[in-house]
Every structure is written in structure tokens, then in C-alpha cells.
Image (tube, grey):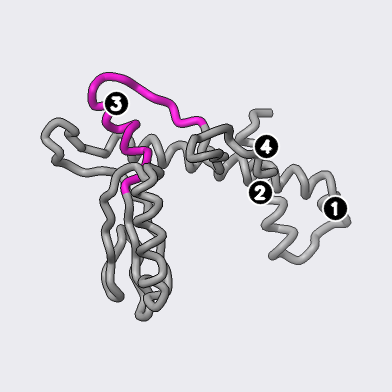
Amino acid sequence: MEEGIERKRLTILRILQEHARPVSSRHITPKGRSELTNARVIEKLGFLSARIDEMTYAMRFDPDRVVGSVISKACILEQQLLERALPLITRVFQRGFGMKTLLALYPPGDRMGEDHVSEGFVGIGTVCSITLNGVLLSRGIPTRSRFGGPLGVESGKPGRFIATGL
């Protein structure tokens, strides 16, 4: 049986187990639960990879003219913490650990893509490294995103990716 079909079958079994009344004495074993968990992780990673590719193809940034659109990474934090956060963000940029020193602030009531910034919060957007994929692709250099995660830093220099246990 194909892997995708098997995952769908396991997903249906999980949904039935969680929401339907039992129709037989069958149940999901601990090994089966582990398989379900692993299948979900693979599905999520596949979705994330597809989303990164979609953003890469949609991006239109010309680094020579410095115009177009870039991919941004956004977060939301409590508005009262912004004054404490800005010096830290500045330090990150000054040390060269940001993709660029551009920062977009979204006040309460504003939208960040499909997300709405709630009252009492502020959104922060920065340039995401996926932008580099889009620039390279626009110049005929295809890339394949493979990994994102914690990168060790020693004495201001990047080291190795750190295992997260995921």
C-alpha cells in the first residue's frame, strides 16, 4: 500500500477512535499511536516545505534596484513589552544576525498577512532568509530548502545546527 494512502487510513482510524462510538473491539495500540504521531510530523514537514516553495516562487524582489516583495517572518508580542524588545532587536541586527535591518511594526487592529493584531499587542515583521531562495531562483539558480532550526553560535560565529529532538 502506498505511504500516503496508509497515512490517510491511520488518520481516519484516529478520528473514529476519538469521535465515534466504538463499533468493534478494535483499538489503537501504543505502537499504532506512535505511528500516527510520526505520520503527522511528516505531513506537517511536507506542508511546510511546500509552503516555503510557494513563497519562494511568489516573491518578487530585485536586489539591484531594491524593489519588489520579500518574505517576512512575523511575531506578535504584548504592546507593553515593545520598549524592552526594541533594544534587543537592534542588538541582533547590529551583530549581523538578521537577514536585513528592516523592521515592520503592526499596531493593534492592523493585519499581518492573514493574522489580525489584537488590542494590547503589536506585530513585528522582519525579512526572512527564504527571501534568499527567491532571489536566487529569480536569477535562474534553483534551491531546495532542507532544514531550519537552532544554529549554535560561538564568539559571534555560526557553528553547527543543534539537535532539537524533533
Q: Of circles 4 and 1, which is in front? A: 4
Q: Of circles 3 and 2, which is in front? A: 3
As drawn, the residue found furthest toward the left would be 65
Residue 152 at x, y percent in the picture: 57, 39
Q: Of circles 2 and 1, which is in front? A: 2
Residue at the image point whose x is 15% and y is 38% from the top = 66
Residue 102 at x, y percent in the picture: 26, 51
**Lower sequence index among marks 4 and 1:** 4
Q: Which residue is mark 1?
A: 26
What amino acid type is highlighted by mark number 3?
Leu
Residue at the image point whose x is 30% and y is 58% from the top = 113
**Lower sequence index among marks 1 and 3:** 1
Q: Which residue is mark 3?
A: 136
Q: Marks 4 and 2, how far apart in space?
A: 9 Å
Whether pointer 4 and pointer 1 mark residues with C-beta atoms closer than 8 Å, the reply is no
Mark number, residue 6: 4
Q: Helix or strand or loop: what does disc 4 sit on?
A: helix
Q: Helix or strand or loop: what does disc 2 sit on?
A: helix
Which class describes the residues within 10 Å of circle 1: few (<14), some (14-19), or many (20+)?
Answer: few
Magenta stretch contains residue 128 = yes
Give the left or right position of residue 130, taking residue 107 as reference. Answer: right
Q: Which residues are magenta?
A: 127-146
Whether pointer 1 and pointer 3 mark residues with C-beta atoms closer than 8 Å, the reply is no
